[in-house]
């Protein structure tokens, strides 16, 4: 888990969540069995077998002992062949299980959409196909597994046959007494268990190796964004500055941010607006250091952001993403996630700041109401306000609202913005939005298009320029007036 928490979005774009869950559960279980039962069996069976062989050779006959274990190299060869097949088949079975996990996760998360589009039968069919695939591949593993026991029994029988035959010959040659031959066969019978144990050991170890290979692929993935060797210590971010900053995603062929120039002093509010896909969230991700830095300068208090530790940089920020991530806990626990040490007084104040008091009174158990998986028990607006409360209770130096007011009405939006302006007048706030009303008060507003700043200034300056910002503002104001008339 520690390794996964260090990974950037690039890693999760390349790895399915269900498969990662399978690696963190089934594969770890297979490895733990190998490390526990496997190692114990290896030591136990090896010592026991060597002791018996030494006793047979030293006290009875080295000649008969060596002849009797002629089948052992054959067993070693066959078990090795079976082991390689087990490795291959088990890897395939685990991959199939990971795919099944991912499918179940998607189906449960998207159950509302599946029902809305009447795709239950189709989803059941796909689940059935994946289940059959997992079953079929595990049967293939079981088939190889079933070869171990008969193979070992046949080879043990051959050892018995050779031991009796050659032992009888030595008795006739008077090189061995009848009593020694009987004792030899007793010892030979004692070798059956370690032979079976070694066969099972190979089986377990190959499964463990297959799981280790899968897990190693995850653990060997290097961090895209890492702490500097000697991070610069800073108290508070006095200003943020971007100078000729350019960035593109690893999977992109074009620049997603192009020659961005910004300067934001502590205590100021920055509004970022633009069309969908213009680069608003991409710019925010650079501040959060979710991806390796691009070219140009991104400075915090005059120091390149990559020279600060990740813990410090992210510790400065309170982030409310577009997709509101809530944990399957109570409303209270979700809010306090931003600051577990907050007092009850702090909690009540933040609820008012996030304009959540009225909704809270409507919830069946108030703050103790469970929000369900990803907040499924709440409306979109309620989830957004809980997310905002979680960020505000942290009292961050830099508050980032990434289109975080889209699910609330204009009146509630204004109330939240006014509360934030009043309580955070000495701290930095960054707001990305499609609603111009959310950034009217901002000290500086930038308009993005295709990753470039095409307009910037205060609200008044952008209105006077009569560009894209002006057009959108007029349209939205007209729509707001029309809605108000209809509501009356």
Image (cartoon, rainbow, N blue to C red):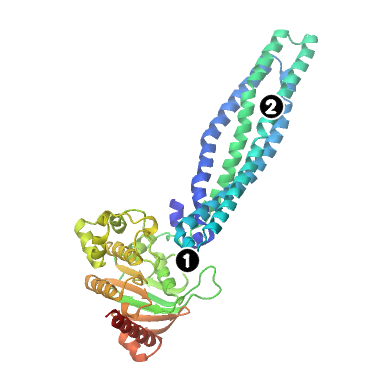
| Residue drawn 56% across the image and 73% down it | 253
Position in image of residue 399 (x %, y %): 31, 68
Q: Nearer the viewer, residue 32 or 349?
A: 349
- Say left or right for 359 vs 314: left
Q: Which mark is residue 153?
A: 2
Looking at the image, residue 226 sits to the left or right of residue 390; the answer is right
Q: CA distance from mark 1 to mark 2?
A: 58 Å
Where is mark 1, residue-wise? 292
The answer to whether residue 311 is above or below residue 37 is below
Which comes sooner in the sequence, label 1 or label 2? 2
Q: Does residue 173 appear in this view?
A: no
Measured as percent of width and height from the top left, residue 106 is found at 49, 57
- Residue 152's place in the image compared with 303, above or below, is above
User: Which residue: 61% across, 33% down?
Assistant: 200
Classify residue 324 by image quadrant. bottom left
Residue 414's tag is none
């Amino acid at each position: 888990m520690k390794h996964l928490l260090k990974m950037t979005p690039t890693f999760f774009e390349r790895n399915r969540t269900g498969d990662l869950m399978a690696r963190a559960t089934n594969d770890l279980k297979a490895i733990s069995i190998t490390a526990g039962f496997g190692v114990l069996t290896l030591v136990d069976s090896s010592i026991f077998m060597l002791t018996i062989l030494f006793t047979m050779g030293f006290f009875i006959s080295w000649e008969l002992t060596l002849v009797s274990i002629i089948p052992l190299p054959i067993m070693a060869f066959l078990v090795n062949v079976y082991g390689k097949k087990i490795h291959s088949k088990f890897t395939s079975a685990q991959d199939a299980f990971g795919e099944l996990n991912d499918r179940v996760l998607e189906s449960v998360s998207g159950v509302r959409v599946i029902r809305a589009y009447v795709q239950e039968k189709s989803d059941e069919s796909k689940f059935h196909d994946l289940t059959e695939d997992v079953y079929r591949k595990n049967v293939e593993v079981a088939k190889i597994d079933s070869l171990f026991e008969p193979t070992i029994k046949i080879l043990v029988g051959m050892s018995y046959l050779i031991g009796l035959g050659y032992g009888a010959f030595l008795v006739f040659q008077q090189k061995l007494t009848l009593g020694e031959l009987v004792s030899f066969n007793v010892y030979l019978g004692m070798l059956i268990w370690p032979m079976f144990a070694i066969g099972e050991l190979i089986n377990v170890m190959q499964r463990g190796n297959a799981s280790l290979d899968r897990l190693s692929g995850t653990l060997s993935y290097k961090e895209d964004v890492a702490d500097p060797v000697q991070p610069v210590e800073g108290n508070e971010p006095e200003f943020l500055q971007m100078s000729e900053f350019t960035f593109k995603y690893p999977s992109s062929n074009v620049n997603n941010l192009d020659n961005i120039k910004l300067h934001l002093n502590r205590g100021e509010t920055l509004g970022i607006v633009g069309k969908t896909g213009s680069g608003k969230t991409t710019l925010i991700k650079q501040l959060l250091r979710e991806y390796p830095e691009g070219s140009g300068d991104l400075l915090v208090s005059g120091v390149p952001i990559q020279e600060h530790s990740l813990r410090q940089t992210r510790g400065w920020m309170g982030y409310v993403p577009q997709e509101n991530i809530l944990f399957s806990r109570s409303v209270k626990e979700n809010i306090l996630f931003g600051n577990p040490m907050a007092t009850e007084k702090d909690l009540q104040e933040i609820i008012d700041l996030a304009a959540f008091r009225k909704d809270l009174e409507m919830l069946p158990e108030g703050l103790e109401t469970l929000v369900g998986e990803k907040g499924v028990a709440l409306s979109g607006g309620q989830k957004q306000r809980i997310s905002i409360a979680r960020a505000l209770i942290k009292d961050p130096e830099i508050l980032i609202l990434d289109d975080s007011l889209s699910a609330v009405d204009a009146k509630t939006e204004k109330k939240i913005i006014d509360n934030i302006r009043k309580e955070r007048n000495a701290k930095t706030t960054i707001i990305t939005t499609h609603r111009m009303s959310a950034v009217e008060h901002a000290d500086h507003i930038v308009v993005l298009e295709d990753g470039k700043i095409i307009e910037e200034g205060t609200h008044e300056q952008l209105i006077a320029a009569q560009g894209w910002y002006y057009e959108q503002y007029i349209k939205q104001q007209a729509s707001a007036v029309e809605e108000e008339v209809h509501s009356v």
